[in-house]
Amino acid sequence: MLRFGGDYNPEQWPEEVWAEDLRLMSEAGVNMATVAVFAWSRLEPEQGAWDFAWLDRILDLLHEHGIDADLATATATPPPWLVRAHPEMMPVTADGVRLEFGSRQGYCPSSPVYRTHAVRLARTLATRYASHPALKMWHIGNEYADHTLECFCEVSAAHFRTWLEARYGTIGGLNAAWGTSCWGQLYTGFDQVEPPRTAPGPVNPAQLLDWRRFCSDALLELFEAEKAALREVTPDIPVTTNFMSILHGLDYWKWAAAEDLVTDDAYPDPADPESHVAIALSYDLMRSLKRQPWLLLESSPSAVSWRAVNAPKPPGMMRLHSLQALAHGSDGVMFFQWRQARFGPEKFHSALLPHGGTATRGWQETLQLGRDLKALAEVAGSYEQAQVALVLDWDSWWGLEAPESMPSDRLKLKELLLDWYRPLHARGIAVDLAPPGRDLTGYRLVIVPNLYLCTEESAKALSAFDGELVVGPFSGVVDAADQVHPGGAPGPLRDLLGVTVEEFWPLHDGVTQATTAGAARTWTEWIHATDAEVVARYRGGELDGRPAITRKGGVTYLSCRLDDPAPFLDTVLARADVHGVEVPRGVEAVRRAGHLFLLNHTTDPQRITLPQAGTDLLTATSRQGEIELAPRDAVVLRLEGRK
Ligand code: GAL
């Protein structure tokens, strides 16, 4: 079954509305609702004074209508009484400002008060609803790190010190790892170490890197604490928390390992004609995290309310974007939110049931999507590994984007990923993401857009891969402590790549450097091909004639960021024997285990020659040869000969 539904906030509505909600949910084919995400103050208006009656009623109603509950632990907004009793639990900024109540996610991730009460709430809910037949999934917290990723209070500082002590054992170990002999930062005790608060100048980058790791871990500890309470009471109910696409702040490889099901919230900007490409990359990450189907838990039916200008989704786009998530491995499409709010910061955020009710095109599109999802039920649960993988590592990302200490602040990991993803996507080639230490067996082509921080283990895993490997610039530079590898880049990748890097030559915005493989931008390097063939050279300028791209066995090193990597990519794809689906620009072709999704993201009709005959599940018709796809329309083919 494919999931269909969304966040349902009945606590914002008088009870008279609930019956209509449920009737319309049934009419639309909704089969899952996320409830109680921000309901703590409603469930427990004063400490220990529980009010469960309304939630009992809602869960009963959902069940009576055949709708499953993704029940939140309701810990995303601690209630006013808790904050007033413990003002120290509110987060503090790097400048020392303590934030106030009045929004959501108002908690210091390290606060023992918040943790104790959150776990108490989770356990209370689990105990009350353990045997409720509507309960099918636990939704812990909400979008961790959305508003509160870090806190610089004294409690957080103490937690950070404990984390550091566990990592380094002795203060000498920390001094060595952080290189504190630089700028006179030698510590003689952990009690002297602080979070990287606003300082007179650039903060030690090793300290910042550990802080990023710590902040991701501190929030994960919170998730784990709630999960442990749920597991004790409801061991068989799967747990999740909704991710936020490709998020810098949290190491999702680590987080996903703690979840039963990966779920994601995705909000591509309807005003950006290319937004479906970046969002496809994040969907591919979601599928790759646990190498299994995932679930789009939040998306917007039309406009959001948090951009400066919030464009609605034109007719057809909600359906198209929903089918896109399925194509990339989601087992359903859920939304924020069911009924459009009348008050609060999200009153202008779209919903499955708009302010105007059922007399709206929005509602018609909700009904249409419900029908489409039924027609596509057979894709649920299907998964297959792609032939191409992009390597993504959070440690390396954090190191690469450290402020004020790099050769250039222009190398941004998401952009580097997209440099490769964009042409792969345009060619209809399925892509997985992988952490650097993962077993890469089965892939034909692995691209490492950047691996600034590269450990011996990562280098070993990459060396063990026997397909085509492409490594991007500024890789193998530092170790896990952000210290430059002895002898410089590419450190532990030196033998694999057969090059040494002598100097980094970053380029200013708008400046390009010619190479025999096309123009480079942002970044170039002065390298030596010690044990590799030179396949492209710099032309003109200070690097004239020097190697730009090298190859050793099946391993290519690019010392620059190519302005247009597509021609180079085509030669690598040919070598790796990887083939996509030929489609016009703006049409997305995605294979999902025996099915081919063709999605027309343009506003023009498009003609496509099908690579294989099949049955279009949306119209229940056989299709072969050339077809025409209307603007923003899609076909989902069950390919012949495959179930
Ligand atoms: C998400 C959040 C939801 C809602 C939504 C609006 O970030 O989890 O609660 O605020 O955005 O787009």
Image (spheres, rainbow, N blue to C red):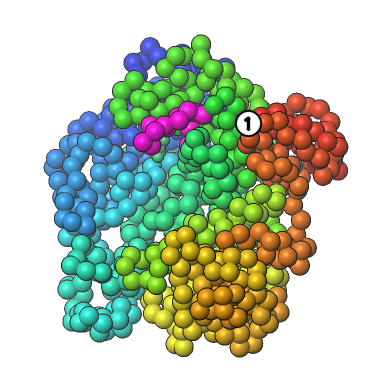
Q: Position of residue 535 (x, y in %)?
A: 68, 76
Q: Which residue is mark 1?
A: 603
Q: Height in image: 425 above or below 299?
A: below
Which quadrant of the structure image shows residue 205?
A: bottom left
Which quadrant of the structure image shows residue 43?
A: top left
> Which quadrant of the figure contains the N terminus?
top right
The part of the chain drawn in magenta is: 297-313
Which quadrant of the structure image shows residue 59?
A: top left
User: Dot 1 surroundings within 10 Å: few (below 14), some, or many (20 or more)?
Assistant: few
The amino acid sitting under disc 1 is: Thr
Q: Left of 134 or right of it: where is 55?
A: left
The residue shown at (39%, 44%) is 143
Q: Left of 232 or right of it: where is 471?
A: right
Q: Main secondary structure of the magenta part?
A: loop
The residue shown at (48%, 64%) is 511
Q: Nearer the viewer, residue 402 or 94?
A: 402
Q: Left of 450 or right of it: where is 157?
A: left
Q: Position of residue 105 (x, y in %)?
A: 29, 43
Tell whether position 304 is magenta: yes
- Where ligand 1 lies, by quadrant? top left
The residue shown at (82%, 44%) is 611
Q: Nearer the viewer, residue 9 or 556?
A: 556
Q: Height in image: 272 above or below 210?
A: above
Tell whether position 233 is magenta: no
The residue shown at (65%, 71%) is 516
Q: Position of residue 125 (x, y in %)?
A: 36, 37
Query: Is disc 1's CB within 8 Å of ligand 1?
Result: no
Q: Height in image: 266 above or below 398?
A: above
> Which quadrant of the figure contains the C terminus?
top right
